[in-house]
Image (cartoon, rainbow, N blue to C red):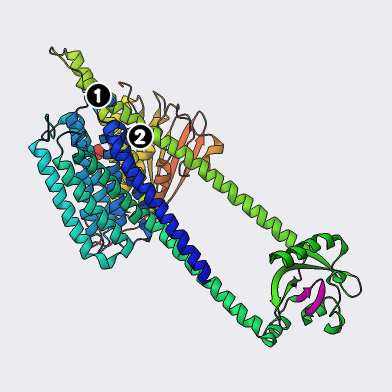
Amino acid sequence: MELGQSLSKNNNKDENDYRLIIYVFVITWLYFLHFNNFYMFHSFIEIFSAVICFGIFMFSLNTYKFSKNDFFAFLGYGYLFVGMLDILHAFSYESMGIFPGASADMVVRFWVAARLFEAATLLMSSLFLYNKISHEKLNMVQIIYFTAFVFSVLDIMYFNFLPDSWDNGKTEFKLVMEYFITTVLIISLFHFFKARKSIDSNLFFYLELSMVLKIISEILISLYSFNTDIMFSLGHIIKVVSFFLMYKGIVENGLQRPYEKLIHNLDMEENYRKHIEDAILKNEKCYDLIIDRSGDGIVIHKNNKIIYANSTFALNIGAEEISSIMGRNIWDFIHYDKTEMTKDHFMNIENNHLNFPFEEIKLLNIQGVEVGAECSFNYIMYRGEPAVMTIFRGFSSQERIISLKNDIAEGEKKLEQSNEYNMLMTEFFTNISHELKTPLNIILGTIQLLEMPVKEKLPDSCEYRKSRYLKIMKQNTFRLIRLINNLIDISKYDSKYLKLDMHNHDIVKIAEDISVSVSENFKSKGVKIIFDTDTEEKVMAVDEDKLERILLNLLSNAVKFTNNGGEIMVNVEDHEDFVRISVKDTGIGIPKDKLDAIFDRFCQVDRSLTRNREGSGIGLSLVKTLVEMHGGKIMVNSTVGEGSEFIFDLPVIVLDEKEASDAIFYDSKIDKINIEFSDIYSLEY
């Protein structure tokens, strides 16, 4: 054991020396690369840093649920945007020809933005070492990050609200920002030092060293005059080293060390087991007693001769006395059609000190009758000499076959379900990428049209087109908001954070108001909406916001699949114990084979990206979730070519007066309608 530990230490030392040589070589190569090919040097630095940022984000995403604080969650989310800004910084050089209007000032501004995001992330994440914030506050932080990122990119590329950072040299604003970033990093360094007892020692060491190098890098970057300066080269190389140390501390330390600790624990258990086995083997009486009391048949044989057998084995083969089988050849009790295979097993066991798991074999008892059994073969030391211990375990072949068939059938069923779910997930993400890219492309194209230089006053027709383009931008913005809202609500529901805000409301009025509010949208599509009810008022406890989402989603689906000249009917029925609301259209209908899966998550009747109607495949799933959260149920009736009817029932519950306080309104109905109908284009478009 001591020899093995010594060899392991030597191997680790050699491996560390090899790594050190590689690190020195890479750093030296980068230094000389800077003076020979600046763009390759700079691109390598920034892409390497961005990859580490994305790795930190993926690590935090997969470990957040197990964390006792929000350190990794905040750090990962912040470094996601740091990585994206570094990518933009790397490819914003004018000579690379990627971004129109690129300039030296754009390059420097992206650098400053990335470093500001990084400094703020390190400072805030150091504060979360002490506690865990609420899920809502964490969502708010994520929204702030996203908003700041979008503002920064738009300002750098288009608006230029902030002062220039480069004008034939560093501007005063750039220097002030570098000093500010350095100050924030120093404060973060101090916070991490204060929290050193709250985190792993290795993680603390790598984070502290990484931040020290980041501070040095910022100071060097603030001193350079041109990108060919040695200060520029050293600053970027030190930046790479700091990111690598961050990777070592967070990703590698968070994954590799627990694995090594697990292996170490397993080795300790294995050594302890061997120690116990050695102790048992040295005690012959204890060893024989354990074997004899075993419920399995055990035979120890050397050179094919039985030197020990327990009473269970003797009983199973019909021997009256154990002594009658001692010294006999083990092959006397093994069926001939298994003999050759078993001889090979025994030869390998004795020569190579191997163990073989249980497998089916046929034995012969004293009378020569076959006996079914399972057996395993194990190399052991018996009374100081090598031998083979064979353990025989009785079994029923038919029961085992049935069990195996059941296991195979169950495995195939689970595999099929897994494949179906993976296929749904693949189609969903493909569709989501389409749903995200389409409005973004429309918005970008519209912005480019609006940015085109105009030398003369535009005629009224052009002003109308300009107004129309702005409407298109607004509609596609609402479309993105709708998709994000649905994804957030599904995530909240899966993590059990989605809650209802129940208050007493007139459900008839809510349904009627929604129907009236969407009538203008329906007119633009050439569709008529009809509202009907058998009661004028029905006060019951509902979440008004969620109920409006349900109705708007169903109405959006209805008008989406109803052609010009069609009708949509909204009906409210009072059944005393429950209220039934139906949304019926005269649209294209749903095939019967799709009705059972229409409320499944990611399900779409038409999944092709060239379909005429837009959608992500999660709207009806969310509707079903919200209805069931109210204690209700939803169903659908449909005939292809005639239309569809979605019906949902809500139980009538009335809250006490204290509970029935005024509801909190989060959005205007106009915005809700615009969001839910954002993927429906009117005839004027």
Q: In the rendered image, which residue does mark 1 sit on?
A: 100
User: Residue 406's spot in the image, x, y percent?
Assistant: 68, 57
Crowding at dot 1, Cα within 10 Å, few <14 / some 14-19 / many 20+, comes out as: few
**Quadrant in the picture for residue 342:** bottom right
- On screen, residue 510 versus residue 565, left or right, reads left
Q: Position of residue 71 (x, y in %)?
A: 28, 57
Amino acid type of the residue that numbered disc 2 sits on in the rendered structure: Leu
Tell me the element at label 1: loop
- Assess whether residue 469 is covered by the magenta stretch: no
- Residue 236 sits in which quadrant? top left
Q: Tell me residue 566's x, y (percent).
A: 40, 26
- Circles 2 and 1, Cβ within 8 Å, touching? The answer is no
User: Mark number for residue 35?
Assistant: none
Residue at image coords 28%, 39%: 31
Magenta stretch: dominant secondary structure:
strand
User: Which of the image's four quarters has the C terminus?
Assistant: top left
**Mark closer to the chain start, 2 or 1:** 1
Q: Is residue 577 above or below residue 41?
A: below
User: Height in image: 86 above or below 453?
Assistant: below
- Mark 2 and mark 1: span between their CA atoms? 23 Å
Q: Residue at x 44, y 59 (%)?
A: 12
Which residues make up the magenta segment? 298-308
Q: Is residue 501 left or right of residue 112?
A: right
Residue underneath mark 2: 436
Q: Position of residue 331 (x, y in %)?
A: 85, 69
Which element type, helix, strand or loop, lies under badge 2? helix
- Say what amino acid the circle numbered 1 marks: Pro
Q: Is residue 151 visible?
A: no
From what the image shows, is residue 620 above or below residue 383? above
Determine if residue 555 is in view: yes
